Image (cartoon, grey):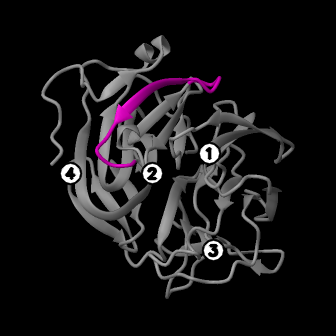
């Protein structure tokens, strides 16, 4: 059984480079906020309501954690096996769905009245695979990855033929046009913009070893994809970027010592590691100052205050 450290600084938070000291709060420790989920993914913060939403993919639901009292409840269930979540620039929830009895294999937006609008479920007349992770740019455009992880998952029972290659897509914030912007990432998964939005980082989940690629964002598209981070034995999944350009990456699977979050400077050098007893899949920044790191890790939700802020749109 995991127990929080009683000592400060928390020994589970390690600097790998002197630059990490600027972002580590010595009097902040890792907290486990809740546990008992089947497969935690896609956290997103709602500061106006002081709550966090995240997907329990195996549980086919979106879960709500209330900051005011720590209560856990089901926000939506069934959720069409929701995975990645974010908010658009109007504060609405935008979700990637893998599919299920209710439909799915799509990107949906939850309106203010609770109804849902389908933003994308097809491209070039063919069904999407299983939209996985999602971010929103300042111009209102929505960018998402579409690997086949959901429809080739016996675990979720969603087996279906793959109609499209695994690609990265952009939904125009004004016209709603869906456009493929890259098809060269092997198993595209987590994605996030640099603070100035000149770069889009994307996890290659089926590269050997896994990698994080950087693309130049030019005229609403992507150019010059290249490897920024070779993950080696690590397994990056989802990640977010802080206002200083550092990448905070869900990490682990296969090597217990790597489970948690690995932090990379903008030049791709690892500078810190937050050890967890479970593999961390996805994370986001939230809390009153957008300086609390929420980590969705396998069966549990963890949190840690850090000395930086996440960029908007994640």
Give how far across and how far down residue 97 sits, in percent.
55, 71
The answer to whether residue 196 is left or right of residue 4 is right
User: Looking at the image, which residue sits at the far bottom?
Assistant: 101
Q: Residue at x 62, y 45 (%)?
A: 209
**Label 1 vs label 2, nearer the camera:** 1
Q: What range is drawn magenta here?
A: 265-279
| Image marks 2 and 4: residues in contact by CB distance under 8 Å | no
Observer-nearest of 138 and 61: 61
If you read the primary sequence from the N terminus, does the residue marked by circle 4 or circle 3 appear first? Answer: 4
Q: CA distance from mark 1 to mark 3?
A: 35 Å
Q: CA distance from mark 2 to mark 3?
A: 25 Å
Quadrant of residue 228 within the rendered picture: top right
Observer-nearest of 112 and 224: 224
Residue at disc 4, secondary structure? loop
Residue at numbered disc 4: 70
If you read the primary sequence from the N terminus, does the residue marked by circle 4 or circle 1 appear first? Answer: 4
| Image marks 4 and 1: residues in contact by CB distance under 8 Å | no
If you read the primary sequence from the N terminus, does the residue marked by circle 1 or circle 2 appear first? Answer: 1
Observer-nearest of 185 and 246: 185
Give how far across and how far down residue 173 sits, in percent.
73, 56
Query: In the rendered structure, does residue 180 fall within the stretch colored magenta?
Result: no
| Image marks 2 and 3: residues in contact by CB distance under 8 Å | no
Residue at numbered disc 2: 281
Residue 73 position (above or below residue 71)? below
Note whether residue 96 is visible: yes
Q: Residues within 10 Å of mark 4 (few under 14, many from 20)?
A: few
- Prevalent SS, magenta region: loop
**Label 1 vs label 3, nearer the camera:** 1
Residue 118's disc is 3
If you read the primary sequence from the N terminus, does the residue marked by circle 2 or circle 3 appear first? Answer: 3
């Amino acid at each position: 059984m995991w127990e929080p450290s009683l000592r400060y600084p928390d020994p589970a938070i390690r600097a790998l480079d002197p630059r990490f000291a600027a972002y580590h709060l010595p009097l902040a420790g890792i907290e486990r906020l809740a546990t008992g989920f089947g497969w935690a993914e896609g956290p997103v913060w709602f500061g106006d309501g002081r709550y966090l939403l995240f997907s329990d993919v195996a549980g086919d639901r979106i879960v709500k954690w209330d900051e005011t009292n720590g209560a856990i409840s089901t926000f939506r269930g069934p959720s069409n096996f929701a995975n990645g979540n974010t908010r658009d620039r109007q504060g609405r929830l935008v979700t990637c769905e893998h599919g299920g009895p209710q439909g799915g294999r799509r990107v949906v937006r939850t309106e203010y009245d609770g109804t849902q609008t389908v933003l994308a479920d097809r491209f070039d007349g063919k069904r999407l695979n299983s939209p996985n992770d999602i971010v929103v740019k300042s111009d209102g455009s929505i960018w998402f990855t579409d690997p086949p992880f959901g429809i080739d998952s016996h675990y979720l029972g969603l087996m279906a033929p793959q109609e499209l290659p695994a690609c990265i897509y952009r939904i125009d914030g004004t016209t709603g046009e869906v456009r493929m912007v890259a098809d060269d990432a092997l198993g595209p998964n987590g994605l996030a913009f640099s603070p100035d939005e000149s770069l889009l980082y994307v996890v290659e989940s089926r590269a050997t070893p896994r990698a994080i690629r950087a693309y130049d964002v030019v005229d609403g598209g992507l150019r010059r994809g290249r490897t920024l981070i070779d993950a080696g034995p690590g397994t990056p999944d989802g990640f977010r970027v802080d206002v200083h350009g550092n990448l905070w990456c869900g990490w682990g699977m296969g090597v217990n010592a790597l489970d948690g979050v690995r932090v990379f400077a903008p030049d791709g050098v690892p500078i810190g590691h937050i050890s967890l007893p479970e593999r961390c899949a996805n994370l986001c920044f939230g809390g009153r100052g957008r300086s609390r790191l929420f980590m969705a890790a396998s069966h549990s939700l963890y949190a840690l205050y850090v000395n930086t802020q996440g960029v908007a749109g994640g």
